[in-house]
């Protein structure tokens, strides 16, 4: 699943624009991850700050 | 905020502000909604704009001009610097804005012209009837309200969620998002009237690093790299921190900004039934420079003009609104986007050695018109063989 490191996130919306599922939304300074996220990791790759991480589901 | 308007504008950046202002000036009722609690903040921009481009929309005002530019430098991957100046020495060629105040001024003007403004108000979903956009559900400080409109203008920036909810694919390809970070730095040694662009795969892969002066000893120091080149340990922030540590070891960042800038082609179609898409949301950022302020204002204003015309005729179908799409594509802006897209695609494929060669071929250029097109023309005139390499694109430049 996608983990948002909120202490790193700069709530810029870069990730929102590349999400192929439209699963991310920025509500003011809070990045929301919706249920249709497939953990593809595209957002984690492009994040300029490294605030997103696809964590192993255990 | 009322329940019904002629035009509902989503987003309070330059595109949205111009759309709302123009709509009310044309005699329509309009409401602009901005999800953030303040217009203009946080800034997600390097804040540069050309002189002519700004003058088309506003007379420069010291309240929102941070610095006046008279030249620019391009630094090659090997460190060699090429200077660009106006053919009239000391001539103004552009400005670095203070977007916090600039955006506020634009929205102020929209409000004074008669538009309603709702801040901390988020369009959370479109109202769609039989495939036709009829307004939006607006969540505002804890309350929810359906606001209907004849035309919705989506100016919701790089995220471009509203159009996506209306069924339009606004996804930016990974290789065409500029993953960006910027510091506003204080107490640094700079040329306060010249922008500087650093190119090269070591400095900013498939992008560039910039210094845009904000004052005598202050500047926006930022970087954009291709999303394709971004990853753990080599993100935009890693590249920028390395540069800052080396170049401005004693500089003090007073603001830290992240962002995404699309450098893809514009959306295939920027209208739908009852919907017009403007600014960054329509992906009309200049793909070569990453500049989007002028393009946002231009498309915002045009969107409102076309909306006025179509509402007047009682037809806001996609077909009727298509005038917006065809007009901007045929405009100077539309043509520049298309041309600069090809130039960008050419440049990102060049190795550092080639970029060095091009930049070394000329150490100083005096431009009659301070535009990227004039610069490219000058470079080609000095390196005629580039014309061959550019192939079909060359025709659109000469």
Image: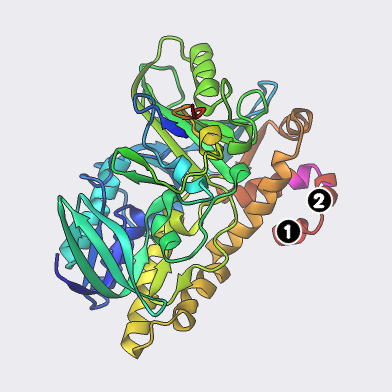
Q: Marks 1 and 2, Cα distance to the nearest angstrom?
A: 9 Å
* Crowd tier of the residue under label 2, counting other residues whose Cα lies within 10 Å: few below 14, some 14–19, many 20 or above: some
Whether residue B49 is visible to the viewer of this picture, yes or no, is: yes
Q: Indicate whether B275 appears above or below B316.
A: above
Q: Do callouts 1 and 2 mark residues in contact (Cβ within 8 Å)?
A: yes
Q: Which residue is mark 2?
A: B387
Give the mark, 1 or 2, whose residue is nearer the N terminus: 2
Mark 2 falls within which chain? B
**Would you say B379 lies left or right of A45 here?**
right
Q: Which residues are magenta?
A: B380-384
Image coordinates of residue A34 in percent, x first then y, are 40, 46
* Position of residue B167 in the picture relative to residue B133 (left or right): right
Q: Quadrant of the N terminus of chain B?
A: bottom left
Which residue lies at the image location 43% right of the left edge and 29% below the top edge? B182
Name the spot of residue B300 as percent of width and height, x first.
38, 63
Q: Chain of mark 1?
A: B
Residue sitting at 31 percent across and 38 percent down?
A30
Residue B241, percent from left and from top:
49, 18
Q: Position of residue B222 (x, y in %)?
A: 47, 30
Secondary structure category for the residue under label 2: helix
**Which secondary structure is most common in the magenta stretch?**
helix
* The label number, if any, that marks residue B398 in the structure image: 1
Q: Is residue A14 left or right of residue B367?
A: left
Mark 1 element type = loop
């Amino acid at each position: 699943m996608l983990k948002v490191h909120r202490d790193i996130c700069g709530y810029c919306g870069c990730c929102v624009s590349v999400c192929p599922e439209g699963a991310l939304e920025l509500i003011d300074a809070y990045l929301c991850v919706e249920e249709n996220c497939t953990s593809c990791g595209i957002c984690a790759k492009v994040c300029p700050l490294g605030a997103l991480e696809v964590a192993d589901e255990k | 905020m009322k329940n019904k308007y002629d035009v509902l504008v989503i987003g309070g950046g330059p595109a949205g502000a111009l759309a709302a202002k123009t709509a009310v000036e044309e005699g329509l009722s309009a409401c602009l909604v901005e999800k953030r609690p303040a217009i203009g903040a946080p800034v997600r921009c390097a804040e540069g704009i050309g002189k002519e481009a700004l003058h088309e929309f506003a007379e420069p005002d010291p309240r929102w001009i941070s610095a006046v530019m008279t030249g620019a430098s391009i630094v090659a991957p090997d460190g060699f610097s090429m200077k660009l100046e106006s053919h009239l020495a000391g001539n103004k060629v552009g400005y670095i804005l203070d977007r916090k105040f600039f955006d506020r001024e634009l929205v102020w003007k929209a409000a004074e012209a008669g538009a309603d403004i709702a801040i901390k108000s988020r369009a959370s979903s479109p109202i769609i009837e039989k495939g036709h956009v009829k307004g939006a559900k607006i969540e505002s400080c804890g309350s929810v309200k359906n606001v209907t409109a004849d035309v919705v203008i989506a100016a919701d920036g790089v995220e471009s969620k509203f159009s996506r909810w209306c069924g339009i694919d606004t996804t930016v390809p990974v290789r065409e998002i500029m993953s960006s970070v910027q510091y506003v730095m204080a107490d640094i040694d700079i040329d306060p009237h010249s922008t500087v662009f650093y190119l090269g795969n070591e400095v900013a892969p498939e992008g560039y690093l910039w210094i845009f002066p904000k004052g005598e000893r202050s500047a926006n120091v930022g970087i954009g790299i291709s999303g394709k080149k971004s990853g753990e340990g080599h993100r935009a922030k890693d590249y920028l921190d390395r540069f800052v540590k080396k170049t401005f070891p004693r500089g003090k960042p007073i603001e830290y900004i992240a962002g995404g800038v699309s450098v893809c082609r514009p959306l295939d179609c920027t209208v739908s039934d009852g919907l017009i898409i403007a600014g960054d949301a329509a992906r009309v950022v200049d793909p070569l420079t990453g500049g989007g302020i002028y393009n946002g204002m231009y498309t915002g204003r045009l969107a409102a003009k076309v909306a006025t015309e179509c509402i007047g005729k009682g037809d806001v179908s996609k077909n009727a609104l298509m005038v917006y799409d065809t007009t901007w594509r045929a405009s100077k802006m539309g043509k520049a986007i298309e041309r600069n897209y090809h130039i960008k695609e050419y440049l990102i494929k060049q190795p550092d050695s080639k970029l060095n060669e091009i930049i070394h071929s000329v150490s100083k250029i005096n431009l009659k018109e301070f535009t990227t097109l004039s610069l490219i023309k000058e470079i080609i005139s000095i390196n005629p063989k580039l014309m061959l390499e550019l192939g079909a694109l060359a025709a659109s430049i000469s």
